[in-house]
Amino acid sequence: MERSDILGRVGSMQQLAYARHIRYEEGRAAGMRAIEVKNGDVRFVAMEDKALDVSEFEYRGVSLGFLSKPGLNGRNPFDTLSDDVVRSIMGGMFFTCGFENIGAPYTDAEGKRYPLHGRIRTSPAEHVRADAGWEGDDYAVTLSGEVREAELFGENLVLRRTVSSRLGEASIAVADEVVNEGFTPQPMMFMYHCNVGWPLLSESAEIVIPSIRVAPRDEAAARDEADWSTVQAPVPDKPESVFIHTLAAEPDGSTFASVANPELGIALVLEFSVEEFPYFMQWKSMAAGDYVVGLEPSNSSILGRGHHEERGDLHILQPQASEVKHLTVSAVEGREAIARLRRRRDGLVRRGGIRPVL
């Protein structure tokens, strides 16, 4: 529909789309700043105080993400301290992992400690802007901000993030630039930890990934390897599993990962490039109360910093250099849309666009 047609049918465009700065008033989230965005069928919340990560994502009123037992919470003194990190990881539609580490906590040979999934997810955004307006016949909502991970006598890495959505498209697009504003080479591990929960996640759901090879992270995952693409009912105290995938991709590097629920008639789809993210992990927890599937494009292995240090291939960003990362999160609806995802997966796997072995 063209701009004039839309304007003829509404009073204010806020009837259809808006970006609103909000502040939580109670509980663990008290004081946390965020931006609520509605754009047609899509509603999402980006957290200003947590790297502009997206905590909530809804399509036509259906929540597609996962919120962990700690729930919405602001920045805490234990955010990056040892085992207490899990008391502040709230899941959300996605949170950003890095830059010093992803995966399990790690202590190097000099005794320096690196927390679970790094520190960037707990860092507040600065220079935050929220804009909504016409771009030709498209009505766009765009958020932007800058997130810094820095230490006296240490690293000085800056994440410049843009999150955007267009009216009529059931998706959000994330564009990230990471800049090393320091004067020494620095590790730059980067992973989007995308989390899918109920009601999209249920026994009728399936995990649609163009996987050429699957490697379980550990013995617990090995026991569940045959069921990596299916979803079971919640089971109390069921151990989590992590699978490391080698993905097929188009010649330009584009690929996808999805959780689809034919019974619900909705699928969540991630679009990204294996050129930017040569690693892909799948986290699967069928535990009651911790019922979630994670889809995790990354530039490093979930085995973590120590793994890469041993191999001598820790990802490094040179002084004054930058890298860009892109992720699109979409909802698609209908059985035919889900069938197209399956056909896309099968076509990629059949053509066998093999990416680097992890």
Image (cartoon, helix red, strand yellow):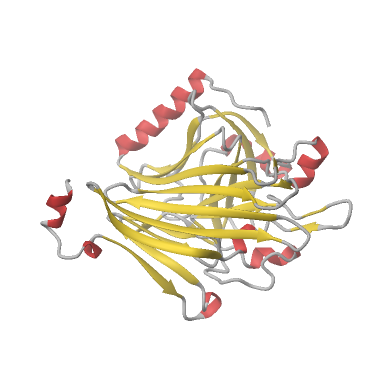
Q: Quadrant of residue 215?
A: top right
Q: Nearer the viewer, residue 216 or 39?
A: 39
Q: Is residue 66 left or right of residue 282?
A: left
Residue at figure coordinates x 51%, y 27% from the top left: 249
Residue at figure coordinates x 50%, y 24% from the top left: 349
Q: Is residue 301 above or below residue 129?
A: above
Q: Is residue 160 left or right of residue 36?
A: right
Q: Which residue is outermost to the bottom?
A: 26
Rendered-image quadrant of the C terminus: top right
Q: Quadrant of residue 303?
A: top right
Q: Is residue 30 above or below residue 168?
A: below
State the image coordinates of residue 317 (x, y, percent, origin top left).
68, 43
Q: Nearer the viewer, residue 39 or 140?
A: 140
State the image coordinates of residue 126 (x, y, percent, origin top left).
53, 65
Q: Nearer the viewer, residue 350 or 76?
A: 76
Number of callouts:
0
Q: Which residue is outermost to the right?
A: 110
Task: Answer yes or no: is residue 227 visible.
Answer: yes
Q: Which residue is outermost to the top?
A: 351
Task: Answer yes or no: is residue 47 visible.
Answer: no
State the image coordinates of residue 242 (x, y, percent, origin top left).
64, 44
Residue at figure coordinates x 54%, y 22% from the top left: 353
Q: Nearer the viewer, residue 223 or 247?
A: 247
Residue at figure coordinates x 64%, y 27% from the top left: 356
Q: Is residue 353 left or right of residue 120?
A: left
State the image coordinates of residue 300 (x, y, percent, origin top left).
67, 41
